[in-house]
Image: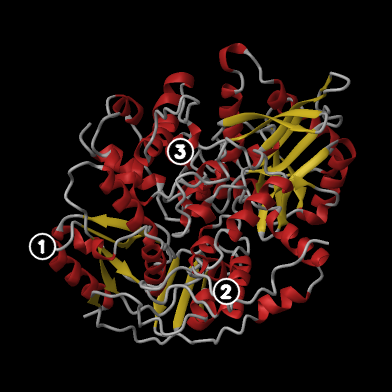
Amino acid sequence: MKLIKKNRLKDFLNTLMNYYDVFAPVLKHKKIRFQKISTPEEVILEYSNTHNKPTELFFPQCEVLFEVDLKENIPEQPPKPDKPVIVFGIRPCDARSLQILDKVFHWDGVDDPYYFARRNNAILIVMGCTEPRSTCFCTSVGSGPMDHNGADLFLTELPEAYAIEPVSEKGKAVFEQVNDLLEDATEGELKSLAELTRRAEQMIDSEVNLNGLSDKLRGMFDHPVWDEFHLSCIGCGTCTYLCPTCHCFDILDEKKGNYVRRIRFWDCCMYPYFTLQSSGHNPRPTQKQRVRQRVMHKFQYFVENFGEIACVGCGRCILNCPVNLDIRSILKRLMEVKG
Amino acid sequence: MSIEQNIREISRKLLSDGVVDLIIGYGQGTLPYATTPVFIRNADDVEQLIWNPCCTNNLALYVRRELEQANKKKDARPLKIGVVTKKCDAKAMVELIRENQLKRESIVVIAVPCSGMLDKAKLHKRAGDRELLRVEVSGSEVILAGRGFEIKVNRDEVLRDNCLVCKDPESLPIADEIVVEKDDYKKPYVEDDFSDVKEHEKLSPQERWAVFRAEFENCIRCYACRNACPMCYCSECFAECSQPRWLGGSVELKDVLFFQIVRVLHQAGRCVDCGACAAACPMDLDIRKYTRKLNYDALNIFRFETGVSPDDKPLLATFSIDDTQEFITEPE
């Protein structure tokens, strides 16, 4: 096991910045979110998780798909990334959410070129969670605070250093690039790593039993339990816009002067206009149907389509919902009612 | 008896006597600084109702929505709702009554003496942005605790700003059932001199624009501010209107700023300063700053305050020949 001492982390990041555009958690307007850094000093290391979802680096809230100059009639492609990217300090839950998005953006074997241009260009340095939040429930959705799935390199914070493990081929290449800065772990440090890993998993005290839920939900579309949840929902986009696995979008053509551009931007199933058709018909006219859709999509339809739950248990929706409509409470209730 | 027990007692009676069909109030949240709105139709369920200084949501929003939905059903008996009401909810309901969005006879106002609500952002700041696992309020003290820390803060210092300037929170403009129990803590009252608005007005247009941009370029356009606001009830919001389309779909400055500017301007003479928008914002943006400017103008120019009496007309529905016209500028 190799280590990077805490006092050498600056050199570590500087080395990475020689080869890559490095994105890391920074403080932007009171909130911690991922941004491209220009110095290692910007990086926030004491964070439970970022406020905004890091998946926005790969699937941004708004992106231009193409622009056309009506005079010239030449479609202009959006610029391609020229330098490979490192995402430093992404949490295991969020790294997993990217694996979930990979499936969506590779539906029917067709790659979404915009998403995968960024995704294939990026290396994830995942930071294990040694201090999970009380709202974290990753262990309930098949993951954990030290889940290496989706990581290229995996870091774990020890008292004086970070344990560093290459996970993928990409990760190994980075590992070689920073090899000079690494040291071998002592026996004490190895013990400390094992202890922290064990402790982190114990610290997840928010447990939701989801055994058999997706099968159960298949027969529950018209269940009266759906009359309960939406009452307090105000229909805003906080839960979806902060959710790392939410991926619904809309496309719009915008014209300015001689320029027309096609943009793609996040949409949200909580909005009444999400399903409004040009005929005027809306298949989901009430908030009850919209709340049901969000839960069903994550815990039933996605399981049916892609074989896994589209929730990584990061707790962002719980922490930020303006009316404290807690997804864990909904899930518990769905588990306990008679299907 | 506590305020909470008093609320339950009144609610139980209203439901079991058949005076109301539904009680809207606050229930236990899952975070130590949050409550969640609850909808009670059965007298046996009133134990779900709670009262504490985290009852931030403005319930007038739900009252209007529930009545609107009930009234859509043909031949249905008119719905009557009992509402656990603090002053800002009452003010919002007053405005909704004045704008013909709510019928006074459809609601039973359970008037609760409010002693100010806690500001989530202030609590987090005082805890050094560490996770809060326990928030305990006793008298003028608030205990904030998490993993490995416990601090005591002065309750006055963690109240929402709009609560600080709220005058006589115990006297509501509309009330039917009065909660007589009182909190043992008295909220400080700070007379609102709108000094923040006046300071902002002193800036040049360029500087004001810079302040506005710096704040709202972080907006994620989730519409939480709009949807948490009891006064935002348009069945079709301009932000989503597609024929014609007023704004684009992006979160680029041009769209976000346009959304926020128009949202705020639609509050002229209507905002009750309940702070629901600011509390709902997941990005902690200073949303209240701009509605305060409108409230200041309404007061300063027209001597108008929202939420005073359901019998008066709304500001924008009145005209007096003596109205000042100073704000009307001639085109150059």
Looking at the image, residue B22 lies above or below residue A273 = below
* In the foreground, A292 or B132: A292
Q: Say if residue A315 shows up in the picture.
A: no
Count all numbered tags in the image, as a single digit: 3
**Which one is in front in this view, the residue at disc 1 or the one at disc 2?**
2
Disc 1 residue crowd, few under 14, some 14–19, many 20+, Cα 10 Å = some
| Chain for numbered disc 1 | B
Q: Quadrant of the N terminus of chain B?
A: bottom left
* Separation of residues labelled 3 and 1 (CA atoms): 36 Å
Mark linked to residue A272? 3
Q: Residues within 10 Å of mark 3 (few under 14, many from 20)?
A: some
Cα distance, mark 1 to mark 2?
43 Å
Element assignment for label 2:
helix
Q: Residue at x 20, y 62 (%)?
A: B46
Is residue B189 in view? yes
Location of the C terminus of chain B by quadrant is bottom right
Secondary structure found at label 1: helix
> For mark 2, what is the residue?
B298
